[in-house]
Image: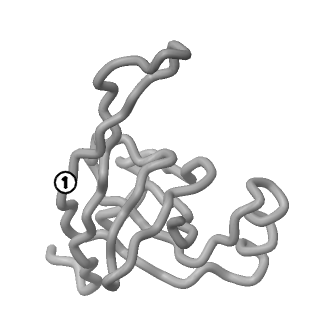
Amino acid sequence: MASMIKGIPVTLYEKTVIGKDEFDRPLHQEIPVTIENVLVAPASTTEILNALNLTGKKAVYNIAIPKGDNHTWQDCRVDFFGMSWQVIGFPQQGIEENIPLEWNQKWQVALYG
């Protein structure tokens, strides 16, 4: 059965380690990957305040990731709605088999920069 809910494509910039700097910290390169069918919804007032208290960053949107996605989202940059966003915090994730729709991970994003 096809879902009546449809997400949008977002560009995820996955971080890949390409070496180390003079202080032995990893150097990263961002590789853009388009992820289809991502749900985007405004964060609630409670979610915004909780994220601000925990991370110091203001969550603006929640994004729901399709089941079966194996990309690394934590602390990555994502582009949608013509702007760049930073994934913050940790995901809320369910057991795929027990969730009826097409998404099983929820992340929060803050304005990038």
Q: Quadrant of residue 64?
A: bottom left
Q: Quadrant of the N terminus?
A: bottom left
Residue at 44%, 20% (x, y): give it: 21
Q: Position of residue 76 (x, y in %)?
A: 43, 50
Q: Residue furthest right?
A: 53
**Would you place residue 64 above or below residue 81 in this image?**
above
Q: Which residue is mark 1?
A: 33
CA neighbours of label 1 inside 10 A, class few (<14), some (14 to 19), many (20+): few
Q: Position of residue 106 (x, y in %)?
A: 49, 60
Q: Quarter of the image holding residue 49?
A: bottom right
Q: Is residue 104 above or below residue 58?
A: above
- Image height check: is 28 above or below 104? above
Q: Position of residue 4 (x, y in %)?
A: 24, 86
Give 58 or 69, whichever is nearer the viewer. Answer: 58
Task: Please state the horizontal and vertical placement of residue 91, each as a whole percent of the image.
Answer: 55, 50
In the figure, 10 relative to 17: above or below? below
* Apparent side of residue 39 relative to residue 88 in the rendered image (left or right): left
Give the residue drawn at x 37%, y 48%.
96
